[in-house]
Image (cartoon, rainbow, N blue to C red):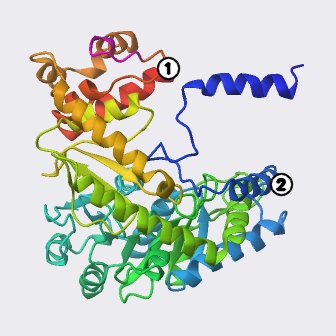
Amino acid sequence: MRTAEELLAEIAALKRHDLPVRGGQVTAYVYDTGRPEVHDAAARAYFEMLEVNTLDPTAFPSVVEMEKQVVGEVAAVLGGGHGIFTSGGTESIMLAVKAARDVAGRARPNVVVPVTAHPAFHKAAHYLGLEVRAVPVDLETFKVAAAAVRERIDGDTVLVVASAPSYPQGVVDPVAEVAAVAAAAGVPCHVDACVGGWLLPWLREAGAEVPPFDLSVPGVTSISCDLHKFGYAPKGASVVLFADPAMRRKAYFASAAWPGYTVINATVQSSKSAGPLGGAWATLRMLGHEGYRELGRDTLEAARRLREGLAAIAGLRVLGDPAGSLIAFTSSEIDVFVLADEARARGWFIQPQLSYAGIPANLHITVTGATLKGVDAMLQVIAESAEAARERGPAQVPDGLAEMVAELDLDALGDREFADLAAAVGVDLGGGGQPGMAVVNSILDALPAAKREEILVRFLAVIYT
């Protein structure tokens, strides 16, 4: 039998190539308050609830009370409503789409979304049998126009979506206008505030101009808000709110068509740990509204300094007018994928985003509570990386490789052949470390979305084999 110390040492060894989750040098995926005591309290609460199963709330009434308190706090900030605690934004969105589909009862349902809407809507539509109708956004503001949304609605539309903010450029769609168009057509409107739901209210209190976006807006029927983003809770924590309790009930699933225990689920999952709920509950109480206000002020100041600093770096420009915490920048002079590799070599992860629907390839930064202390260091690294990328020039993709990949029948390739193909462009799918990804991203950027998806599926299959 192994000791706990031995196991923890092995975990530490396995994590040697992981990006750091604290300190602000990873500008995606993790959310850091810069306050270790908050994360420690959440971890202890998470562990306390680790073995509690939320499957049967009558067996563990602590789950009911904690969820009511967490959902109640979110509802109090986001315009009321009736909610469900979920494992993340994708599950929150899945439940919102399910509820809208089941309320409408259409034979061929569709959902109308901006092209900047999160892929979770595409995933929900894929699983639940809906058509996605994507609406282009303005290529200067990156916001969707209500008139363009109206044109895509028909008698089979069961849900219209707006983002607050959209992830790619961090801008808030005109929620009131989109919701009004949806209401006039008799269609529910969901606001994806997974990123902004627990940040925009605090930015508003810190002086930012934040338009109305929550359930207080006429026509908005549901909203999703991730607490494991700017709520700073451990991963696995989100809330979806419905204006109408009857619509919330449509998100539920029950089955009595078997001789076993009673099955009634509020979420997609059945058995699951109450650890994330405990972690979210503790984080909300540890920080309180004043703590979130302070983090909001820090985030707003860091984002302002970052935008101004990026604008001062030759060749770089910020996309759109970000609402506060999410900033994307691009360049017509520098290969942004090479810039990302240069920053990674200097210890900073900046997230690449491929071009799509007329929006150029760019780099994305999520500003958190920990960013303010390191914003000058980040700008220095970006400036150095931009200069190095300018000197290196664009990523060198072998002639004809992108065209060859576009024509490949990937289903005819075995995992070994696919791994060999990846190795030919410098990606070792069997190793760790910090690979340069500029060539890979350049190839993906040259491909249509469907072929990108095929490659990504094969990539995932191979690395887990």
- Foreground mark, 2 or 1, reads 1
Please report the residue visible at 68 percent of the width from the left and 64 percent of the height from the top: 283
Q: Position of residue 127 (x, y in %)?
A: 42, 51
Which residue is under mark 2? 48
Q: Which mark is residue 432?
A: 1
Instruction: Judge the density around disc 1: few (<14), some (14-19), many (≥20) Cα neighbours within 10 Å.
Output: few
Numbered-mark total: 2
Task: Tell me, yes or no, whether the two marked residues, 2 and 1, touch with CB atoms within 8 Å.
Answer: no
Residue 339 vs 206, above or below: the answer is above
At label 2, the amino acid type is Glu
145 or 309: nearer the viewer: 309
Task: Point out the stretch of residues depicted in magenta.
Answer: 423-428
CA–CA distance between discs 2 and 1? Answer: 33 Å
Query: Left of 100 or right of it: where is 408?
Result: left
Q: Is residue 427 magenta?
A: yes
Instruction: Judge the density around disc 2: few (<14), some (14-19), many (≥20) Cα neighbours within 10 Å.
Output: some
Q: Name the secondary structure under disc 2.
A: helix
Q: Which mark is residue 361?
A: none
Q: Position of residue 17 (x, y in %)?
A: 54, 25
Quadrant showing the N terminus: top right
Would residue 268 be seen by someone viewing this image from the given angle? yes
Residue 87 vs 191, above or below: the answer is above
Please report the residue visible at 50 percent of the width from the left and 76 percent of the height from the top: 202
At label 1, the amino acid type is Gly
Mark nearer the N terminus (2 vs 1): 2
Q: Is residue 299 magenta?
A: no
Q: Name the secondary structure under disc 1.
A: loop
Please report the residue visible at 58 percent of the width from the left and 75 percent of the height from the top: 83
- Please identify the quarter of the rendering in which residue 213 is found: bottom left
Q: Position of residue 175 (x, y in %)?
A: 31, 78
Would residue 167 be seen by someone viewing this image from the given angle? no
